Image: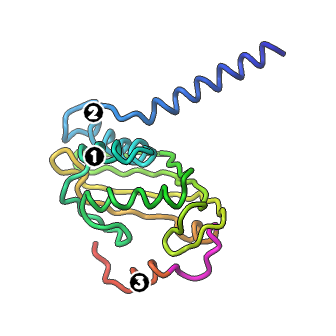
Amino acid sequence: MLKYLFTGATLALVLAASHATAQEFTDPPAAPGTVAYNTWLGRSFSEVLLNERSQAKRIEILNRIVATDYIQHNPLVPEGRQGLIDFIPVIYQAMPDARFILRDVYATEDRVVTRWTWTGTLTGEGFLGVAPAGQKLEFDVIDTWTVRDGQLYEHWDQFDWPRAFVQLGVQGLPAPFYAVAQQPYDR
């Protein structure tokens, strides 16, 4: 019995250590313009940056991996690097336990795509017009970026919003989505 407890405790420590290590911001493994570098950019954003709880550290990472004149094709997020700096805290204010689990990274010399899962419980402030009532979320996201001068430059995303809306208990479109759906689409 003690053997199994020790094995279980050891496994738990190894998993905890590997999870913590996977989310540390590291130097790139290769020069800009390479598949390895762009893979690092995607991982740094989707696994490290989004899971970072410190706004100061998030800003440090954003300054390093996102272009100042970042083009954001998600109309719910303001333009530029500053738009991300302002938007990410909104997620944590609404879902203090938010977590982002990286599933895949695909890169070329000038693009990177990540697929990840967003989990969290809406217990803080309202989010996208939805009042918090302890709703549990788990849905997938795909991000696509162009890379310019070693930084993420232009961004498109696809969220599994139907799943999220069902989990949030939303019927119809939340007001911010209705307003966005009325705007011309910028591809």
| Disc 1 versus disc 2: nearer the observer | 2
Q: Nearer the viewer, residue 104 or 44?
A: 44
Specify the label residue 179 is tagged with.
3
Q: Earlier in the sequence, mark 1 or mark 2?
A: 2
Which of the 4 image quarters holds residue 87? bottom left
Q: Which mark is residue 108?
A: 1
User: Residue 185, how many percent across, how many down?
Assistant: 32, 78
Q: CA distance from mark 1 to mark 3?
A: 35 Å
Q: Which residue is mark 2?
A: 28
| Above-or-below relation of 116 to 184 | above
Please indicate whether residue 115 sits to the left or right of residue 97 in the image.
Answer: left
Query: Which residue is at the far bottom?
Result: 182
Q: CA distance from mark 1 to mark 2?
A: 15 Å
Q: Magenta region: which residues?
A: 167-174
| Residue 55: percent from left, percent from top | 37, 48
* Residues marked 3 and 2 touching at CB (< 8 Å): no
